[in-house]
Amino acid sequence: MKLDRLIAKHHQMGRTTALRAIAARRVRVDGLVVVNGHVEVDRFSTVTLDEELVQAAERSLYLLMHKPVGWLSATKDAQHPTVLDWIDDPDKETLHLAGRLDRSTSGLLILTNDGNWSKRLMAADFKVPKVYRVETDVPVPADAVEAFERGFYFHTEDITTLPAKLEIIDECLSRVTLHEGRYHQVKRMFHRVGCRVTALHRESVGTLRLPEDLKPGEWRPMTTQERQAALASSAAA
């Protein structure tokens, strides 16, 4: 919401009056005087007018989690346990997932209650790289590297996948980097080269990597540096 609208709504005044109050340096956002009434203010900012509280900041959450196999990437489900069941935080009900993982997939999961942040991180235009470690039932053929780079046509969606980087680590172990997130995309791509995925693990999303000290089911808050670097890298992608 724009600052002038917030002030006008709270004090039941016209926007012109609110703009005058802002221009007169009577409004602070997070302790700093703001004179531009058209700036956007989210719910995580404290806003005052003449030292009177207009809006109290809500608590923001940005979490990294090691999702275990078998748990749903959802906030609630009537039949199955969800990743939110692992979270021990009084505000966990405000969280949403920034990019889901299949029930059979493990690895890095990002949870937040900041919708603006997660939209910017996962915006399709930025094509944020997502890295997965993949185990298959049979050796990956050498020509799969070129096939992944060319992309695969999925008739159901009528799209061709973006170029993906495939690194063959061992006969049945690979690492793949995607810049999109189609339905069951990794499994479908490997199926096209004659392999069935037996284990799938997400290692990173952009600059955010799964911390080595996080065991399956564990989570921790992001550092400010991690959160800011993630947005910076997505915008530059």
Image (cartoon, rainbow, N blue to C red):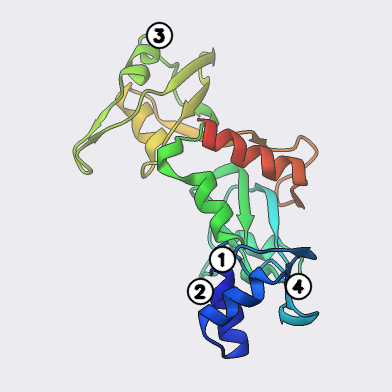
Q: Are marks 4 and 2 in contact (CB under 8 Å)?
A: no
Task: Tell me where residue 44 sits by quadrant.
Answer: bottom right
What's the distance in space between the residues labelled 4 and 1, CA to CA?
14 Å
Q: Looking at the picture, how far across and down is residue 45, in whole percent?
A: 70, 67
Question: In which quarter of the view is residue 163 placed?
Answer: top left
The three-letter amino acid code for the residue at tag 2 is Ala
Residue at image mark 2: 78
13 shown above or below 206:
below
Earlier residue among tags 3 and 4: 4
Q: Is residue 24 left or right of residue 223?
A: left
- The residue under the point 49% across, 33% down is 198
**Above or below: residue 171 compared with residue 121:** above
Mark 4 residue element: loop
Q: Amino acid at mark 1?
A: Thr
In the picture of the structure, the residue carrying the numbered disc 4 is 90
Q: CA distance from mark 2 to mark 1?
A: 11 Å
Name the residue that disc number 3 marks. 142
Of the pair 3 and 144, the residue shown nearer to us: 3
Pointer 2: residues within 10 angstroms few (<14), some, or many (20+)?
few
Mark 2 element type: loop
